[in-house]
Image (tube, rainbow, N blue to C red):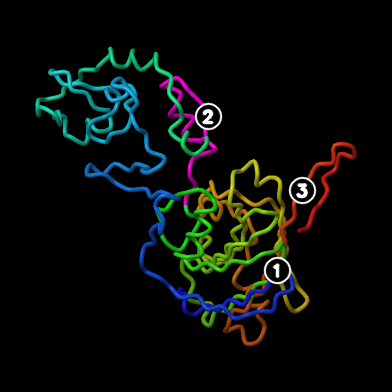
């Protein structure tokens, strides 16, 4: 599916519709301001790390001893050593083909039990402490926490390329606007028209990402075409730029229709912690079969013309009455 065949007309909260044309950009995007966000990069040994503000800086010689000399990540059992006492992590032992990277002697299957025992006695701050996490954990619990830490950076939610940029929400909003040229709108309602000149040319491709600012938060509206089994379908869904717990404070609805028919969807936006593909493959959104989409388009059914409308609202619990109250911005 060619992006330059797609026209999107958008209006929000009473704004006049303006034509918006989207063109493909084959290049990868990078952070314009590294100090506000980070990239997933690879070192010379091909190991992915988060660098910059989220990197671990060893504070003591003990911490340095627990740092793998190959990938520079913290080592966890089993910690291997050669006959001369040089250590490395189990992942890198496979990568160096069982040869010590320091002295080139054969590694064998010797474990450094003393260093593993020392690690048990350590308590360390979360590696995202510079981003605001105040927690301190035993060495062997730290890794598990960091995988789900609420202060860990977010991945770029843009689905049109394998973008490796990570950062906090303000940084990613600027990145989406400046680097990916994503359309930005303000308001709790939206009205989009998607036009495709040849709807029978369906392949796995993302059509559109629009960012909405409402209730002081940012939401990503996705619209795309992909194959569901053997059948091509169109799908629209909303993601919340924040954590899942915050996302549950909001609800949204989507509607598409014409010729006296309509399809509606109502749900809770998914957090961008869940990847775009995970949300799409779970079918958590408004799904439109191609035949129905062409029926909504009217005419000779040779051109796709879909108008998707929707709104976002905030759910707030009333402690006295019990039921949730809807708030519109």
- Nearer to us: label 3 or label 2: 2
Q: Where is residue 215 in the image (x, y as percent from the top left)?
A: 70, 54
N-terminal label among 3 and 2: 2
Snapshot quadrant of residue 300: bottom right
- Location of residue 137 with respect to 233 vertically, above or below: above
- Location of residue 205 with respect to 322 vertically, above or below: below
Q: Position of residue 132 (x, y in %)?
A: 52, 36
Q: Is residue 266 rendered magenta in the image? A: no
N-terminal label among 1 and 3: 1
The residue stretch that appears in magenta: 133-155
Residue displayed at 35% across by 17% down? 119
Disc 2 target residue: 134
Disc 1 target residue: 309
Describe the element under mark 3 as helix, strand or loop.
Answer: strand
Callouts 1 and 3 close, C-beta under 8 Å? no
Residue displayed at 28% across by 34% down? 72
The answer for how far apart the CA atoms under marks 2 and 1 are is 42 Å
Q: Position of residue 91 (x, y in %)?
A: 28, 32
Alpha-carbon neighbours of circle 2 within 10 Å: few (<14), some, or many (≥20)? few
Residue 298 image label:
none
Disc 3 target residue: 315
The answer to whether residue 132 is left or right of residue 62 is right
- Location of residue 128 with respect to 289 vertically, above or below: above
Q: Nearer the viewer, residue 193 or 229?
A: 193
Residue displayed at 27% across by 22% down? 65
- Nearer to us: label 2 or label 1: 2
> Image quadrant for the C terminus?
bottom right
Describe the element under mark 1 as helix, strand or loop.
Answer: strand
N-terminal label among 2 and 1: 2
Describe the element under mark 2 as helix, strand or loop.
Answer: loop
């Amino acid at each position: 599916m060619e992006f330059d065949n797609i026209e999107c007309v958008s209006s929000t909260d009473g704004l006049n519709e303006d034509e918006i044309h989207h063109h493909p950009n084959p290049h990868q995007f990078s952070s314009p301001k590294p100090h506000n966000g980070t990239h997933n990069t690879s070192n010379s040994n091909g190991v992915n790390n988060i660098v910059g503000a989220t990197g671990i800086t060893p504070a003591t010689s003990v911490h340095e001893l627990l740092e793998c000399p190959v990938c520079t990540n913290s080592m966890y059992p089993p910690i291997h050593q050669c006959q001369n006492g040089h250590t490395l992590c189990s992942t890198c032992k496979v990568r160096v083909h069982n040869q010590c990277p320091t002295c080139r002697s054969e590694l064998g299957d010797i474990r450094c039990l003393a260093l593993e025992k020392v690690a048990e006695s350590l308590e360390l701050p979360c590696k995202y402490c510079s981003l605001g996490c105040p927690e301190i954990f035993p060495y062997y619990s730290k890794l598990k926490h960091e995988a789900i830490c609420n202060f860990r950076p977010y991945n770029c939610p843009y689905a049109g390329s394998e973008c490796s940029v990570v950062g906090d929400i303000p940084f990613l909003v600027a990145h989406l606007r400046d680097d990916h040229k994503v359309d930005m709108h303000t308001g709790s309602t939206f009205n989009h028209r998607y036009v495709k000149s040849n709807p029978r040319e369906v392949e796995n491709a993302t059509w559109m990402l629009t960012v909405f600012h409402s209730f002081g938060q940012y939401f990503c509206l996705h619209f795309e075409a992909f194959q569901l089994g053997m059948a091509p379908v169109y799908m629209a869904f909303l993601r919340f730029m924040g954590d899942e717990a915050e996302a549950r404070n909001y609800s949204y609805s989507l509607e598409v229709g014409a010729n006296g028919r309509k399809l509606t969807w109502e749900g809770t936006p998914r957090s961008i912690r869940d990847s775009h593909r995970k949300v799409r493959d779970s079918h958590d959104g408004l799904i439109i079969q191609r035949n129905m989409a062409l029926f909504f388009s009217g005419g000779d059914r040779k051109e796709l013309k879909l108008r998707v409308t929707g709104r976002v609202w905030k759910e707030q619990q009333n402690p006295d009455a019990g039921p949730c109250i809807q708030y519109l911005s």
